[in-house]
Image (cartoon, grey):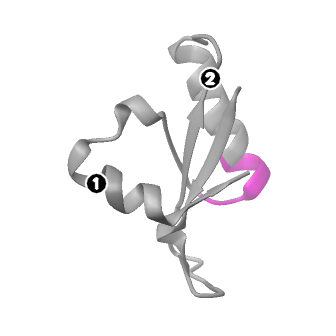
Amino acid sequence: MSNLLVFLALWQGTIFLKKSDLDIIVDFSEPIGMFKFLELRDYLCNALNINVDLTTPRALKSAIRLNVEKDVIYV
């Protein structure tokens, strides 16, 4: 994994919205395959005890890319 970004749709200022999901963008240095990708998503859901939407930078639609880029936190 080369980058892990958290998209702040979940946060409003410092108030955590418990009914939201956590949007995570992950960039891999090499392909990991669909099953490993789904295993990672399931692991994050269980570890964080919240629904996780996991995606890659290439999967972001251009219509939302600018909004996402201004609100991400690099982890």
Q: Which quadrant of the view contains residue 25?
A: top right
Asked whether, in this view, residue 13 is left or right of residue 20, the answer is right
Can you say whether 65 is above or below 27 in the image?
below
Q: Position of residue 73 (x, y in %)?
A: 63, 59
The answer to whether the residue labelled 2 contacts the one labelled 1, judged by CB atoms less than 8 Å apart, is no
The residue under label 2 is 28
The N terminus sits in image quarter: top right
Q: Position of residue 74 (x, y in %)?
A: 67, 52
Q: Name the residue located 78 percent from the left edge and 49 percent from the top edge.
A: 47
Query: Camera-side residue: 68 or 33?
Result: 68
Can you say whether 16 is above or below 59 in the image?
below
Q: What element carries label 1?
A: helix
Q: Where is residue 43 in the image (x, y as percent from the top left)?
A: 72, 38
Of callouts 2 and 1, which one flags the residue occurring earlier in the amino acid sequence? 2
Check residue 48 for magenta coloring.
Answer: yes
Asked whether, in this view, residue 41 is left or right of residue 70, the answer is right
Can you say whether 70 is above or below 65 in the image?
below
The type of residue carrying mark 2 is Phe
Q: Residue 36 carries which label?
A: none
Secondary structure mostly seen in the magenta stretch: helix
Q: Name the residue located 66 percent from the left edge and 42 percent from the top edge.
A: 4
Q: What element carries label 2?
A: loop
The type of residue carrying mark 1 is Ile
* Count of numbered tags: 2
Asked whether, in this view, residue 58 is left or right of residue 20, the answer is left
Q: Name the residue located 59 percent from the left edge and 36 percent from the top edge.
A: 26
Query: Camera-side residue: 2 or 14?
Result: 2
Asked whether, in this view, residue 56 is left or right of residue 73, the answer is left
The residue under label 1 is 64
Q: Name the residue located 71 percent from the left edge and 59 percent from the top edge.
A: 49
* Distance (Cα) linking label 2 and label 1: 21 Å
For the record, the magenta segment spans: 45-50
